[in-house]
Image (spheres, grey):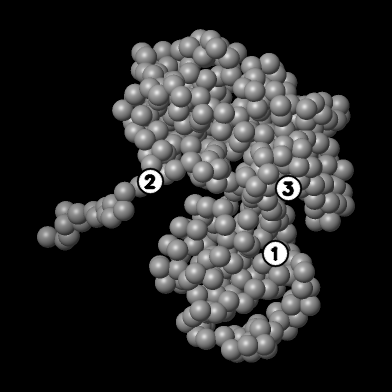
Amino acid sequence: MLYRKAYQKLLDWKESGAKQALCIVGARQIGKTTLVREFAKAEYGSFLEINFVTEPSAADIFAHDLDVQTLIANLSAYARKPLPVGKTLVLLDEIQECPEARTAIKFLVEDGRFDYIETGSLLGTSYHKVRSFPVGFEEIYHMYPLDFEEFILANGVQKQTLAYLKQCMELMRPVPLAMHEVMCRLFYTYIVVGGMPRVVQTYVDTHDIGLVVKQQKDILAQYRLDITKYADSTDKVKITAIFDNIPAQLDDKNRRFMLSRLDVNGRMNRYQDSFKWLEDAGVALPCYNVTAPQLPLSLNTKHNLFKLYMGDTGLLCANCLENVQFAILQGDLQLNMGSILENVMAQQLKSKNFDLRYFDSKRFGELDFVLQNNDKVDLLEIKSGKDYKKHAALNKVTAVSEWSFGKLVVFCKGNVEKEAGIIYLPWYMIMFMEKAQIPKGSIHKLDLSALERK
């Protein structure tokens, strides 16, 4: 089995006492079901898997009264085997196909006999069908394709090598040249292969790029079928047009998605639900412009100005009309490859739970990524060429005395270096960008003694 960081999330959830169901959401074919099966095999004595796509009749379990005794009796009858109390994990797979099952989760979790994991590929697109959400009884966890770190582990890189590379970054020490070149080649390969588990496994087993691209095109075809199946009839054409237009729009100089190129008479209020559908399906990653690269970024966000990245860069490469794969494998990321490089960075940042934002203004120019990292704003520039130390927008923005920032990072083809407060890192070190966590045990208690009546 491919190593997935999400496995630790499942362990943490179980060790917490599983007082909530865990709802794993994400795009199709990113390995949700496989992960839960492996988890159940290792951590539970009993496992019941219900897939509402392959077994549509299973919806009958939840078709009538939702009192817990009836539900448990129906689950046990469906399993056709004893389900030991306290030792059974129930997987409700493709739960978007059975909205009543999601409503029933509240009662099943309250009952406490079994643990429950839900998985869904298009939950966000089917929210209107759920009669009552199990608020407080369900923890949502977003899962993504394999990130670069998971990819290189699948390809035989050892964890001690990762530890050494991270130490180089932390100590601002250049990576030895031979190691640096190998890591760059691995990064080029990741851009082409992407992080869809079946595709990654095919590459690991065969190293056949032709076969990799064929599987990627199969996945893209499946995504288009999902649009036909799940999208509202009035939105199908719009959603398909947006999806097919992502590569061309990213290839534009400013990368921004221009609705006018899709529909000369188009208005954002008519297309907003279609963009949201692709985001909720995990197929596309919007990156919004901000009026100023300062906190709070959420209040500075302009939702009508955005870039639209693909959820997996390997799929983006396969979706391009040109055969870009072999140029990338040779390390050619300069000519018309900037958009693909930005896409892979966006994919990595999203997998780290960063909200994607950028800054662009006539006065300052454009910053590729503006990240809120707790009480700091980190600025990231992504450079594909050799002149990566030329970054006019970054220089102008950091010169504003009223603005303050956390890290200033330029990801480039060079090695680890720090100059004039700017950190230069090789592209592959994006895997070490982490969102700062609020320290555990941070207790804030107010002294109210002054309010006591004398």
Is residue 369 left or right of 277 when viewed as pictured? left
Q: Nearer the viewer, residue 175 or 288?
A: 175
CA–CA distance in space, label 1 to label 2: 31 Å
User: For this view, does 321 lie left or right of residue 334?
Assistant: right
Three-letter code, disc 1: Glu
Give the residue type at disc 3: Trp
Q: Nearer the viewer, mark 2 or mark 3?
A: 2
Residue at 42% in and 39% down: 162
Location of mark 3 (residue): 277
Badge 1: few (under 14), some or many (20 or more) residues near its Cα, within 10 Å?
A: many
Q: Is residue 447 above or below residue 389?
A: below
Q: Secondary structure at mark 3?
A: helix
Between residues 195 and 292, which one lies in front from this camera angle? 195
Q: Quadrant of residue 90?
A: bottom right
Q: Residues within 10 Å of mark 2 (few under 14, many from 20)?
A: few
Q: Is residue 361 above or below residue 150?
A: above
Q: Which residue is mark 2?
A: 437
Res 243 → quadrant: top right
Callout 1: helix, strand or loop? loop
